């Protein structure tokens, strides 16, 4: 099949009814990228013969070496369905838990997703996570049960057993849809295999069937088992002539993934909190190419050929044109679109313009970040940004990096800055005491890939420390009020701290309450869902990214408004590093009860306000049963029954606990939790305890207090590592009680 010319693809893109924006999501190693390859071969982009081995969307060398996807790639495919041409904008996403941030960003661009599930392993923890993320963004799922060849060749299943396995997987996915989908879609998005929304097949062998197609062509599972019995050539013939995977998959995409016109009607109200009756609101609901430009940027990537940042995102309304000036809402800056392009795998094809309803790339938006909303300049103050992207896990592992050649330090600083733009889930910090550059990621693999990226893209050889776990500081009781005095004694702040309630923490985590919300709206949510006093909730000044809140309970304090921003900044700085071990603070409510502010601005600058506020907060924390929280990982382990006791022994040895155990035929499914600090050699231990017969998935679960008997020891180690005195400070080191 010939590759369609870019002009033809662009012509179809102008009709939103013939456009589909979709992605492929799954647990790591369930076959997403191999599935993508079959689709690319169908579009004539890679050779049919090497599809399934080429991993064309894994265009980073590291991805091909490791056999996993770490970045999301995009491509525009051409497909004919019932005699009509369609453009399918495809986004391939990573499945490893460490890269779930990429999945979150990709979903913003999609209207539908093919959920790939391994027929043997079934629904794994990351399957559940990516499906939940999809449903939160109102992305409709299609199910592809992959690796059916394993049921036939490895497990020697009969046709009845194969069908039973499919029923189990479909049931489990439907249960998750009814659990996580918005109420309007719980029923309508249930997967009924009789409609063709469920595909069964093997991406590696390039065949796939749906029930309607099997009925039409008279294919039974016993026929497929027979094909495998005959050998490789028979399988190849079946895949090319009888049941090509790309055909059934792309047909399902056209049939079940809604067009931008249909999808934006229900996705925009969820993803964008602006006025739907405004010009921009109406244009987005109608996918109007003539309306004001609204371009939601999901990715910022450095193009290795030109070493410049390229933005990738979804055009929800208007047309993205080369040479036009646009306004970046979050960055509050103008930018000029220097070049516009559509993706063809790793290559970008430059075009003049891309209309609404499509995915496109833009050069020249260096100040944009993932999650940015770019709009037409004329609508500068009229279009609020899209909802913030919510990441399912937080950076919990850190390494210190330094260049092997000290002369390359400026180059390393520049590379780390660009890395943090490309991947906002990576955090880069400088330890002021030791001068170390600290890189924090979602897990050891996330860090490893980041270091590989530094070497490949920038040619930087770096030395790293062993990975260390990032803790959080918190308190377990309310403190008395402390007086914080500025160094010049002219300003005084009366502050107490208390633990933030679980309900409020959940509301901040889910993004239901944010700092830039209307105070009345936020107060109502906190009153109704977390039992807060309405007046107190209305007086929230700041919500910190580490989930801390600052409340102003003062009345009639002169000059307080003039120093409000400085006080908030002081609060944020205190939350970045707590008093116990200079780790970030989490789950704290800071209350300002009263204040004395000097009338002369010269006497109330940051140098005076910062220490006064910080010292009062620190003293309060140290008297309120302070503790450390450690990150806990959820494990989902499938293992033959004879190894269950060995697995339990490994988990117990690592301070873990068993949450649940269920039987799956000859296998047991164990759900457990263990601290991240104990997990660095977990893979090796599980493999040796089960003779390599266990397979498992991990994901970030929650923060939990460090056991009291270990607390002082952990604090001491962290402080010594940071070059501090081993003993934590006392309240009187900061302040005397009020």
Image: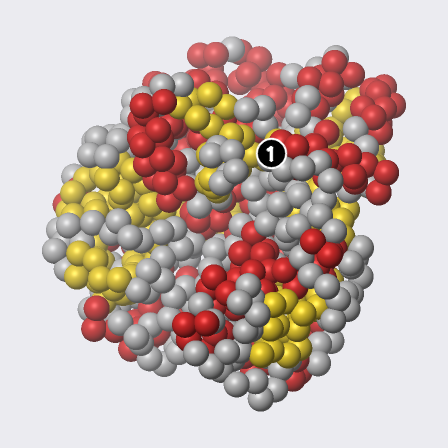
Q: Position of residue 330 (x, y in %)?
A: 36, 62
- The residue carrying pointer 1 sits among few (fewer than 14), some (14 to 19) or many (20 or more) residues within 10 Å by Cα, namely few
Relative image position of residue 358 (x, y in whole percent) = 29, 54
> Which quarter of the figure is the N terminus placed in?
top left
* Residue 127 percent location from the top left of the image: 60, 40
Number of callouts in the render? 1
- Left or right: 614 as drawn, with respect to 326: right
Residue occupying the far bottom of the picture: 556
| Residue sitting nearer the eye, 130 or 426 | 426
Residue located at (39% from left, 78% from top): 275
- Residue 113 in view (yes/no): no
- What residue is shown with label 1? 723
Q: Residue 239 placed where, x, y %?
A: 43, 24
Could you say which quadrant of the image residue 380 lies in? bottom left
Colour convention = secondary structure
Write the residue at 29% across / 48% down: 311
**Helix, strand or loop under label 1:** loop
Looking at the image, residue 172 sits to the left or right of residue 306; the answer is right
Which residue appears at 65% of the width and 64% of the height?
616
In front here: 697 or 267? 697
Res. 230 in view: yes
Q: Quadrant of the C terminus?
A: bottom right
Viewed as shown, does residue 484 lie left or right of 137?
right
Q: Which one is in front, 89 or 683?
A: 683
- Return the residue found at the far front: 488
In this rendering, is residue 687 above or below 535?
above
């Amino acid at each position: 099949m010939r590759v369609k010319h870019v002009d033809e693809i662009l012509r179809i893109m102008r009709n939103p009814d013939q456009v589909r924006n979709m992605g492929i999501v799954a647990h790591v190693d369930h076959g997403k990228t191999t599935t993508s390859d079959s689709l690319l071969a169908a579009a004539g982009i890679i050779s049919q013969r090497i599809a399934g081995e080429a991993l064309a969307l894994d265009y980073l060398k590291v991805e091909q070496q490791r056999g996993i996807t770490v970045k999301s790639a995009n491509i525009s495919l051409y497909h004919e369905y019932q005699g009509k041409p369609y453009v399918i904008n495809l986004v391939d996403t990573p499945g490893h838990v460490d890269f779930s941030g990429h999945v979150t960003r990709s979903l913003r661009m999609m209207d539908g997703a093919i959920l790939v599930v391994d027929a043997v392993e079934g629904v794994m923890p990351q399957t559940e996570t990516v499906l939940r993320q999809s449903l939160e963004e109102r992305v409709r799922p299609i199910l592809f049960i992959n690796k059916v060849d394993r049921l036939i060749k490895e497990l020697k299943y009969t046709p009845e057993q194969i069908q039973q396995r499919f029923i189990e997987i479909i049931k489990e996915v439907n249960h998750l849809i009814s659990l996580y989908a918005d109420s309007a879609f719980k029923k309508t998005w249930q997967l009924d295999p009789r409609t063709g929304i469920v595909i069964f097949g093997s991406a590696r062998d390039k065949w796939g069937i749906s029930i309607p197609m099997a009925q039409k062509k008279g294919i039974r599972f016993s026929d497929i088992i027979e094909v495998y019995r005959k050998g490789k050539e028979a399988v190849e013939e079946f895949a090319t002539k009888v049941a090509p995977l790309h055909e059934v998959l792309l047909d399902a995409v056209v049939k079940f993934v809604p067009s931008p016109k249909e999808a934006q009607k229900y996705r925009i109200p969820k993803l964008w909190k602006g006025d739907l009756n405004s010009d921009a609101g109406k244009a987005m609901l109608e996918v109007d190419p003539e309306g004001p430009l609204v371009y939601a940027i999901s990715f910022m990537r450095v193009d290795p050929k030109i070493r410049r940042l390229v933005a990738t995102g979804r055009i929800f309304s208007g047309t993205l044109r080369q040479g036009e000036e646009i306004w970046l809402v979050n960055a509050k800056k103008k930018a000029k679109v220097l070049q516009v392009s559509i993706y063809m795998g790793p290559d970008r094809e430059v075009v003049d313009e891309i209309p609404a309803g499509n995915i496109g790339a833009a050069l020249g938006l260096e100040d944009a970040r993932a999650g940015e909303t770019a709009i037409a300049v004329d609508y500068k103050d009229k279009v609020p940004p899209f909802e913030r992207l919510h990441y399912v896990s937080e950076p919990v592992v850190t390494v210190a990096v330094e260049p092997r050649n000290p002369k390359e330090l400026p180059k390393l600083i520049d590379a780390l800055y660009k890395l943090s733009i490309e991947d906002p889930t990576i955090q880069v910090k400088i330890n002021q005491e030791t001068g170390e550059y600290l890189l924090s990621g979602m897990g050891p693999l996330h860090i490893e890939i980041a270091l590989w990226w530094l070497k490949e893209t920038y040619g930087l050889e770096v030395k790293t420390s062993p990975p260390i776990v990032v803790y959080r500081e918190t308190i377990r009781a309310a403190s008395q009020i402390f007086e914080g005095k500025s160094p010049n004694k002219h300003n005084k702040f009366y502050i107490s701290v208390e633990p933030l309630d679980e309900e409020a923490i959940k509301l901040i985590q889910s993004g239901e309450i944010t700092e830039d919300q209307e105070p009345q709206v936020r107060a109502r949510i906190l009153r109704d869902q977390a039992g807060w006093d309405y007046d107190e909730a209305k007086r929230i000044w700041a919500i910190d990214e580490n989930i801390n809140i600052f409340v102003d309970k003062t009345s009639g304090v002169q000059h307080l408004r003039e120093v409000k921003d400085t006080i908030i900044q002081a609060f944020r700085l205190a939350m970045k590093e707590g008093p116990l071990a200079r780790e970030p603070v989490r789950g704290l409510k800071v209350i300002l009860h009263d204040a004395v502010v000097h009338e002369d601005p010269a006497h109330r600058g940051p140098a005076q306000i910062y220490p006064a506020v910080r010292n009062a907060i620190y003293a309060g924390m140290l008297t309120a049963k302070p503790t450390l929280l450690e990150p806990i990982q959820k494990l989902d382990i499938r293992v033959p029954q004879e190894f269950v006791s060995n697995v339990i022994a490994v988990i117990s040895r690592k301070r873990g606990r068993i949450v649940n155990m269920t039987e799956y035929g000859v296998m047991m499914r164990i759900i457990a939790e263990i601290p991240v600090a104990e997990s660095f050699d977990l893979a090796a231990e599980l493999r040796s305890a089960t003779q390599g017969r266990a397979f498992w998935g991990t994901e970030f679960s929650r923060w939990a207090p460090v056991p009291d008997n270990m607390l002082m020891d952990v604090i001491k180690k962290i402080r010594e590592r940071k070059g501090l005195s081993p003993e934590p400070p006392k309240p009187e080191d900061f302040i005397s009680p009020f």
